[in-house]
Amino acid sequence: MATPQITNDHSVAATLESSRRGVNSVARFSFRFFAALLGLALLTTLVLRTGPQTIWNQVHKVGFGLVLVILLGGLAHLIRTWSWRLIVGYDITAVPWSRSFAACLVSEALGQLGVGGKVLGEGMRISLLRSAVPLTNAIPASAIDGGIHLVTSLIVMLSGITVTLLLAPLSGMWRNSALMFAFAVIAVLILVFVSIVKRWALMGNAARAIARVPRFHNWIARKLPVIDSSEQNLLDFLHKAPARFCAAFLLNFLWQAITILEIYIILRFMGTHITVLGASVMEGLTKLINLVGAFNPGNVGTYEGGNMLITKLFSVAGTVGLTLALCRRACVLFWASIGAICLMLMRTPNEQHRKHDVNSDPSPEIAQL
């Protein structure tokens, strides 16, 4: 006679859990929507206060330089594609470079939507290439590629903060905050490198520690298989294919160098005297701005405002910083639009061949990305 009561209890618990997830989803969406509105309002305010005509005059100075920056953006995407193909660890010759490049553009286009967009973008890249690349290779490759890219970005950001601390006239509070953040980044990088060499399950143990918090337990528990699998594949990749690991690492550093070159070209075309070292410092600080604005979809407003602050540290007018940010955003939007076109063109052939694909069954790994 106790069975109906137990069934009812389970049903109520499931209903409450579903309601809680729905409320959390609405809350997250509302927060991101509100953040996007604030960012858009900030960008509008910055443009109006600076003067649209003033900005247009600066953009006009850049001129052909903007075309060079767009071409460099395409080269950067090509390098990221090359890195991903190296990491896959599978006979990827059946996948044309054009298709993997287009899938990279799709991933980067969706990644402009914020943290959730990056996860969605990687899932979409895996989905677009799954007819030729097994999920057991594609999912770890995306995780490893993202991890390597994150580490190289942290190194560039740390170098920018360090040079700023040495040369820029910062107030006591800003200097202390920057020092604390720099030490935190150094500690994280050291911990990552030691854990890779010693084969420590750093991400898995950190996830399990976070899962002890009741609020995050269920969410982390669903992700643990993917986290453990990705981390194990990263450790195996380094020790079984060190040459490809080093090549992927160098390619990501080359990607970072291209972003530095973008800043150098734009500022030079605007008539601003800057060295390559200065451009690298600005890119490092820009990555800090991107980190701060990570939960703002597209980093709209915060990115432009942050660039204005960065250029002022170099005794350059804020108008130059705003123009620099807008030119770089134009490059991003150009390639994002190409990625959107690729997504529309690639979906139909993929769906037509899906019934012949041995990997076409819905996969829990994709759902957990």
Image (cartoon, rainbow, N blue to C red):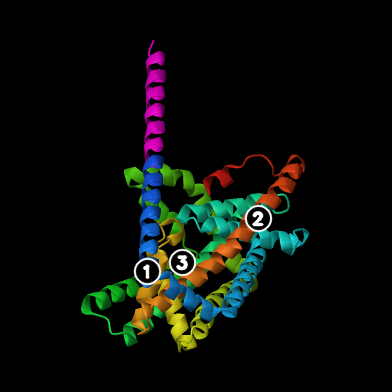
Looking at the image, which is closer to me, 328 or 94? 328
Crowd around label 3: few <14 · some 14–19 · many ≥20 (10 Å): some
Residue at the image point whose x is 50% and y is 64% from the top: 199
What residue did someone put label 2 on?
A: 341
Residue at the front extreme, as displayed = 53
Q: Give the CA distance from mark 3 to mark 1.
A: 37 Å
Q: Which mark identifies residue 118?
A: none
Residue extent of the magenta highlight: 1-24
What residue did someone put label 3 on?
A: 195
How far across and down, in percent of the image, does residue 37 sit? 38, 53
Residue at the image point whose x is 30% and y is 76% from the top: 179
* Residue type at numbered disc 3: Ser
- Predominant SS of the magenta segment: helix
* Residue type at numbered disc 2: Ile
Residue 128, magenta (yes or no): no
Residue 3, magenta (yes or no): yes
Label 3: state its secondary structure.
helix
Image marks 3 and 2: residues in contact by CB distance under 8 Å: no
